Amino acid sequence: MDTRLLTTFTTLARTGSFTAAAAALHLAQSTVTVHIRTLERDLGVPLFDRLPTGAPLTEAGRRLLAEAEEVLDAVARLRSAAGEEGPVAGRVVVGTPESLCATRLPAVIAALRTEHPDVDVDLRAASTEECVQGLRSGHLDLALLMNEDAESPEIATEPVAREALTLVAAPGHPLAGRDRPAAWGDLAAEHFFLLEEGCAYSDAFEQRLRAAPGANPRITRFGSVDAARSCAAAGLGLTLLPATTVAEHLRDGRLRGIALDGPPLSDIPVRLARHRRRWAAPAAREVARALVRHLAQAGNGDGGRQAADAPPV
């Protein structure tokens, strides 16, 4: 069987659209249609329902998807084995929260270019849900998740580092100039700029905030660290972000840390995630090793903790 047909089949299964599959494969849509028709004729069963809203898998297609992925993984392993004596090479797509993409990962990519110059890393800023879906669909080879736990039957994770969190506001904010920590009740009516829903630490902070007696905060959600940080620096309210993303702003005085009364904000774990069943190419394995090694060397949150421990006033 022509493995190109299986590649087209698995891509269409992931995207759910002939147009999207054609774009992902850099093929004409008519070519995708021919590949699928040829495969369906060879197997003797329809694999997709052709609907105006897309192309969902039929029951037969769902049964065959895992088998097709295993065949393609086996082919990839054979090709890798044939070239194992040469340098590690290839493209690895990594999903990651924006905060890590901007702060921790440039050093990792720089080290990889020295160690494995033929390995290209494509970083995709994405939420936890987008990263998990990307691993499931095959659009991502690896992902970094900032969650306490993201294990599932399909996704395996391992902790590699921890990131400190910091609550910050502009220097002129009333809570920034106090000589005592702010109680949760003091935050009840404040305006907060948090990262979008699905960001685990932002969701947990909002839940804790709303549990305070009389809490009625105004909360605006953003998909961008820079947007939330800029609103806080402009004096519009407070934001909670990984300490590494506000370290420079704390040092130059554009932001001030807000100390909280009671238990401190917990560090958040950084987990390396991958698909349990999908075979990892040598390039992906090397990128995974580099992520584990360099993120751990970054101090397991120590670098961020220096920013978090910066004087709040």
Image (cartoon, helix red, strand yellow):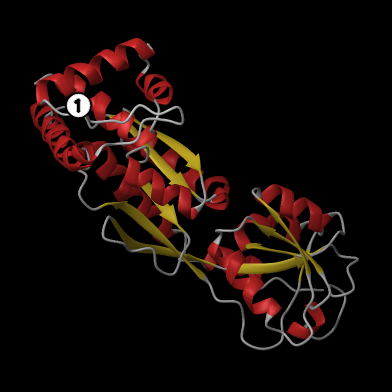
Residue occupying image coordinates x 34% and y 54%: 273
* Category of crowding for the residue at label 1, using alpha-carbon neighbours closer than 10 angstroms: few (below 14), some (14–19), many (at least 20): many
The amino acid type, in three-letter code, at marker 1 is Leu
List x then y, in percent, for residue 102: 57, 46
**Which quarter of the image is occupied by the N terminus?**
top left
List x then y, in percent, for residue 46: 21, 28
For this rendering, which residue is in front, 144 or 199?
A: 199
Q: Quadrant of residue 141?
A: top left
Side of 275 where 51 appears, left or right:
right
Which residue does the numbered mark 1 point to in the structure image? 6
The answer, for residue 126, to whether it is visible in the render is yes
Against 241, residue 7 (above or below) is above
Side of 39 where 288 appears, left or right:
right
Residue occupying image coordinates x 70% and y 70%: 310
Against 48, residue 159 (above or below) is below
Against 241, residue 312 (above or below) is below
Q: Quadrant of residue 172?
A: bottom right
Against 246, residue 216 (above or below) is below
Q: Quadrant of residue 22?
A: top left
Side of 130 where 209 appears, left or right:
right
List x then y, in percent, for residue 212: 72, 84
Residue occupying image coordinates x 29% and y 36%: 57
Q: Element type at marker 1?
A: helix
**Which quarter of the image is occupied by the C terminus?**
bottom right
The answer, for residue 141, to whether it is visible in the render is no
For this rendering, which residue is in front, 197 or 243?
A: 197
For this rendering, which residue is in front, 83 or 110?
A: 83
For this rendering, which residue is in front, 139 or 141?
A: 139
